Amino acid sequence: MGQTENSPAGTSDPDGRPEELHIVEQRAAIAPIDRLPVEVLEQIMEEVYFPPLIGLASSDLRESPWTFALVSRRWRDIACQHQPLWATIWVDIERILGLESHWTIAPLVLAILLERSSGHPLDISVTYRHEPVGPGFNPFATLLHRIYEVLIPHSYHWQDVWFSLTETTALSFARVRGHSPMLRNLRIDFGNFGEVRHGITINAFEVAPRLKALHFSVSSTCFLLPWAQITRASLQELRDETPALIGRMHNLRELSLDLSDPSIFYYFSTTTTIPASTSSVRLA
């Protein structure tokens, strides 16, 4: 087959793609599985995909759901438009920091996932275990700030979230107030290195009508929360304030306490009042 004047060597596709890729797509287009109804293909994709983990060396571009787009044009169109495939997002800050080239790519990948989720309820985890500190420029704080700057405008669609924060990023959550109608499960922590200064309060989640489950440490109580509507709570880092916080959860049904924290035996006693609505207390 001869080459056209404008076609690069080794290509036969108008878009200039490699000939091998063009052949693969042509074969996929006539494969029996490619003729399945859209709803069936969507179900297959949901069964086999793994939620995107932003932080792997490949940024997950070699994993599902990204790989669905490599099967054929039809699969690419179906995958990109099927919102649930893009609505569960894990962001591992430490993995991202392990590759300098991904410091700027990660927020862009996150923005693509959020765009493709297109209003579907979001399950998001942004985690780190230690704050990397070094001389000069510290990319950790900059990266974390950029990640939350991308996430916060989508708070209307947060459903189940786990956010590891610093004081600076926590303060930026004031913009979420009144904008989280889908939120039902909230986990907040401040990693292993600090918390918001005493006396600072952040009104971010006090108006969240569907919020029923909390996983938090006392250091997270800088956030104003709708304590009375909480039915399931998991507590860590117990302190003097802990019994009082439990007492404010008048509709609490399930309570989990971190038994690995020896302070539980200091802060809790026979005088600690558990709400009458509580039917289960678990020491984890």
Image (tube, grey):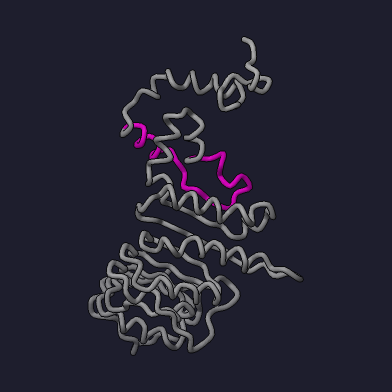
Q: Is residue 271 visible?
A: yes
Identity of the residue drawn at 40% across and 63% down: 155
Residue 7: x percent and y percent? 63, 21
User: Does the stretch in magenta take in 139?
Assistant: no
Q: Which residues are magenta?
A: 40-64
Using the image, determine if residue 213 lies above or below residue 249. Answer: above
Viewer-closest of 3 and 237:
3
Using the image, determine if residue 224 lies above or below residue 86. Answer: below
Residue 20: x percent and y percent? 60, 21
Which image quadrant: the C terminus?
Answer: bottom left
- Farthest residue toward the left? 277
Viewer-closest of 114 and 90:
114
Using the image, determine if residue 16 lies above or below residue 166. Answer: above
Q: Is residue 59 left or right of residue 72?
A: right
Q: Is residue 232 left or right of residue 218?
A: left
Q: Is residue 159 visible?
A: no
Identity of the residue drawn at 63% across and 69% down: 131
- Farthest residue toward the front? 5
Using the image, determine if residue 82 lies above or below residue 283. Answer: above
Q: Is residue 259 left or right of residue 211?
A: right
Which image quadrant: the N terminus?
Answer: top right
Q: Quadrant of residue 248?
A: bottom left
Residue 158: x percent and y percent? 38, 61
Q: Is residue 18 left or right of residue 241?
A: right
Identity of the residue drawn at 37% across and 46% down: 84
Viewer-closest of 113 and 96:
113
Identity of the residue drawn at 43% across and 40% down: 80
User: Does the stretch in magenta take in 55?
Assistant: yes
